[in-house]
Image (cartoon, rainbow, N blue to C red):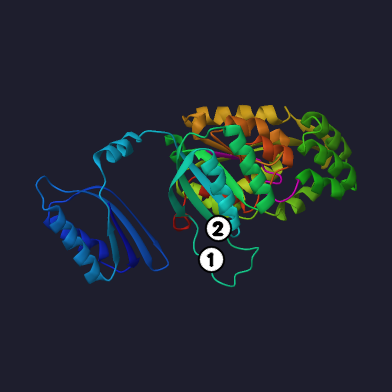
């Protein structure tokens, strides 16, 4: 095992491997990381039969001294190597940490849980760009990805521990199996209200109708899972009866798009993903966002308007939680993909069915009951943080 560290410079690897090539060395494994201007390089080397081992090692150390770097050589016995080879194919997981800033305190809590669960950290990679000194604490993005080997001793305890860390230390922790599906997602379905946009449209309509407090109270109970969605939806709709149609245009033009949504959709489109809005809100506003963001599909409730006034009813079946899950399955079939290749993002209790159906279900800035029930949650960053859960680096994002 050759371990090299020191000041990084161009041509370092070429010069080292030139020396190795002279002795017919085979590279069994290698890895390199550069932090700031310091390089750390590891190579597992196999010397040819009959090679002068001491001569090879001496030349490597001489070359390292010539390059001004530190080198350390360790002999690896055959049994240790065989055991290492035998670990191939064992379970592999990806742990993604998301925050405005990542601190040592956060990392020690996470890595302690990893160790207690009999998992071993194999690689650590930074996915986000470097944060300038002096940048405001509430801006920027920090994401590191840890590759883990092993099998968690208690998946339920692992999940609870990560939820506790997230709530206590202002960091999102996502734990996924590193399967082929993780690298081949093809369809992303979004809730609209409080997910793609930073408001509940029905609350905006209610304020315009002068019944804002009444509708907001019902909305809150429904999103927290304390009230059946269809029942709450009909109650809220009845309060909107008589609202002038012209109000809808003003509300649509001023919808506050969620932080990172445009960057996310733009990147997904660039890489060939299909996107959909599956909403318990209204198609009028869904279609507006479809045109603004470039979304492929929209399924929501059709607001009934007669003689320029809202009737307090909707046309067709109400899009509730069960319908969202059904639409997710239908779209996957239409696109010819597996459910494991789908992503669903939402914030309310009525999103839980589709979050559980999707290959990757993400509770976004969600109510506690939703955050605790979903497999993954993002609360600290904008919607574009979804890309980091897929392994995107900042330089890959449009």
In the rendered image, residue 130, in percent from the top left (x then y), is placed at 50, 64
In the displayed structure, does residue 303 sit left or right of residue 180?
right
Q: Residues within 10 Å of mark 1 (few under 14, many from 20)?
A: some
Q: Which residue occupies 83% across, 36% down?
A: 237
Q: Is residue 273 left or right of residue 19?
A: right
* Residues under numbered marks 1 and 2 in contact, where contact means CB atoms less than 8 Å apart: yes
Query: Which residue is drawn at the image coordinates 12% and 57% (left, top)?
Result: 22
Q: Position of residue 243 (x, y in %)?
A: 86, 44
Q: Please report the bounds of the magenta region as a residue range.
A: 186-200
Is 303 a magenta residue? no
**Residue 196 magenta:** yes
Q: Earlier in the sequence, mark 1 or mark 2?
A: 1
Residue, x 62% and y 26% (percent of image)?
Answer: 326
Residue in the foreground of this view, choosing between 264 and 106 = 106
Please identify the quarter of the rendering in which residue 297 is found.
top right
Residue 111 % position (x, y): 53, 48
User: Badge 2: few (under 14), some or many (20 or more) residues near its Cα, within 10 Å?
Assistant: many
In the foreground, 161 or 250 = 161
Spatial separation of the CA atoms under disc 1 and disc 2: 8 Å
Q: List the residue tagged with mark 1.
A: 131
- In the picture of the structure, the residue carrying the numbered disc 2 is 142
Q: Secondary structure at mark 2?
A: strand
Q: The residue tagged with tag 1: helix, strand or loop?
A: loop
């Amino acid at each position: 095992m050759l371990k090299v560290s020191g000041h990084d410079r161009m041509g370092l690897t070429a010069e080292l491997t030139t020396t190795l090539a002279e002795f017919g060395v085979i590279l069994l494994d290698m890895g390199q990381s550069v932090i700031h201007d310091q390089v750390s390089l590891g190579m597992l080397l196999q010397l040819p039969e009959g090679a002068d081992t001491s001569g090879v090692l001496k030349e490597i150390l001489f070359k390292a001294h010539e390059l001004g770097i530190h080198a350390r050589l360790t002999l690896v016995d055959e049994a240790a190597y065989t055991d290492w080879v035998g670990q191939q194919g064992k379970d592999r997981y990806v742990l993604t940490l998301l925050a405005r800033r990542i601190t040592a305190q956060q990392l020690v809590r996470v890595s302690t849980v990893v160790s207690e669960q009999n998992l071993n950290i194999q690689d650590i990679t930074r996915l986000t760009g470097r944060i300038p000194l002096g940048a405001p604490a509430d801006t920027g993005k920090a994401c590191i990805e840890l590759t883990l080997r092993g099998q968690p001793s208690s998946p339920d305890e692992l999940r609870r521990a990560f939820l506790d860390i997230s709530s206590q230390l202002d960091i999102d922790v996502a734990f996924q199996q590193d399967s082929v599906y993780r690298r081949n997602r093809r369809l992303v379905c979004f809730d609209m209200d409080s997910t793609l946009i930073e408001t509940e449209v029905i609350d905006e309509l209610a304020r315009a109708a002068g019944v804002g407090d009444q509708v907001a109270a019902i909305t809150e109970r429904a999103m927290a899972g304390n009230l059946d969605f269809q029942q709450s939806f009909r109650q809220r709709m009845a309060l909107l009866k008589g609202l002038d149609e012209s109000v809808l245009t003003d509300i649509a033009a001023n919808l506050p798009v969620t932080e990172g949504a445009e960057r996310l959709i733009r990147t997904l489109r660039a890489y060939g993903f299909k996107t959909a809005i599956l909403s318990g809100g209204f198609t009028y506003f869904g279609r507006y966002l479809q045109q603004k963001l470039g979304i492929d599909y929209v399924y929501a409730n059709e607001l009934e308007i007669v003689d320029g006034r809202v009737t307090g009813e909707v046309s067709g079946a109400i899009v509730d939680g069960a319908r969202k899950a059904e639409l997710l399955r239908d779209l996957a079939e239409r696109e010819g993909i597996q459910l494991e290749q789908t992503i669903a993002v939402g914030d309310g209790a009525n999103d839980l069915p589709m979050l559980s159906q999707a290959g990757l279900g993400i509770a976004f800035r969600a109510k506690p009951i939703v955050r605790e029930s979903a497999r993954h949650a993002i609360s600290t960053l904008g919607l574009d943080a979804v890309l980091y859960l897929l392994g995107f680096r900042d330089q890959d994002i449009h």
